[in-house]
Image (cartoon, grey):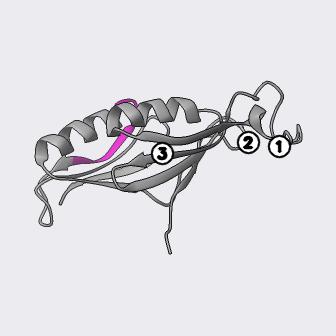
Amino acid sequence: MQVQPYLMFNGRCEEAIEFYKRVLGAKVEALMRYKEAPQPPPSEQLPPGNENKVMHSSLRIGDTVVMASDGHCSGQTDFQGFSLTVSVPDAPTADRIFGELSDGGKVQMPMGKTFFSERFGMTSDRFGLGWMVIVQ
């Protein structure tokens, strides 16, 4: 059994994919656009003009697969009640990733030494997605 996150970016998925490719080294394993579907979704589910938006994508980040979509392209994202954790091997990597994820986002707990890790911090990125960065 696997549990995998499926993230809805409500119209900003392609931007998010490019961001995670740059910051986390994400690799796109699959990407399908709404216009490629055998039967397009009804207009009440997808506003006209969004045919090029991402219907489904699969990203490999390290050993993890994260799936993402533009969903219903309704505008703002609403990631609440969870965070994704990035475990890295050393402090310089943690500091770099934390800084890049935080750019345009909001830091909840600055990166620093804790009783359980050499480096740990919590932030949300420019899409509102929560991240915890930790040195194992």
Label 2, on which residue? Answer: 72
Q: In this view, does 13 lie to the left or right of 55?
A: left
Quarter of the figure with residue 45: top right
Q: Is residue 109 magenta?
A: yes
Label 2 and label 3: CA atoms lie apart by 20 Å
Magenta residues (range)? 102-110
Residue 16 image point, x, y percent: 50, 35
Q: Nearer the viewer, mark 1 or mark 3?
A: 3
Q: Which of 135 and 108 is in front in this view?
A: 135
Q: Indicate the amino acid at tag 1.
A: Gln
* Residue 92 painted magenta: no
- Residue shown at the point (65%, 33%) measured from the top left: 11
Q: Nearer the viewer, residue 116 or 3?
A: 3
Q: Is mark 1 on a helix, strand or loop?
A: loop
Image position, residue 94 (x, y; %): 20, 45
Horizontally, is 36 left or right of 92 in the view? Answer: right
- Which mark is in front, 2 or 3? 3
Q: Quadrant of the C terminus?
A: bottom left
Q: Earlier in the sequence, mark 2 or mark 3?
A: 3
Task: Report if residue 15 is visible in the image.
Answer: yes
* Residue 25 x %, y %: 34, 38
Q: Mark 3 points at which residue?
A: 59
* First of labels 1, 3 by sequence position: 1
Badges 1 and 2: C-beta atoms under 8 Å apart? yes
**Element at label 3:** strand
| Disc 1 target residue | 45
Residue shown at 86% from the left, 42% from the top = 39
In contact (CB < 8 Å): disc 1 and disc 3: no
Query: Separation of disc 1 and disc 3 at Cα?
Result: 24 Å
Nearest to the observer: residue 105 or residue 10: 10
Relative side of 89 to 21, left or right: left
**For mark 1, does the 10 Å Cα neighbourhood hold few (<14), some (14 to 19), or many (20 or more) residues?**
few
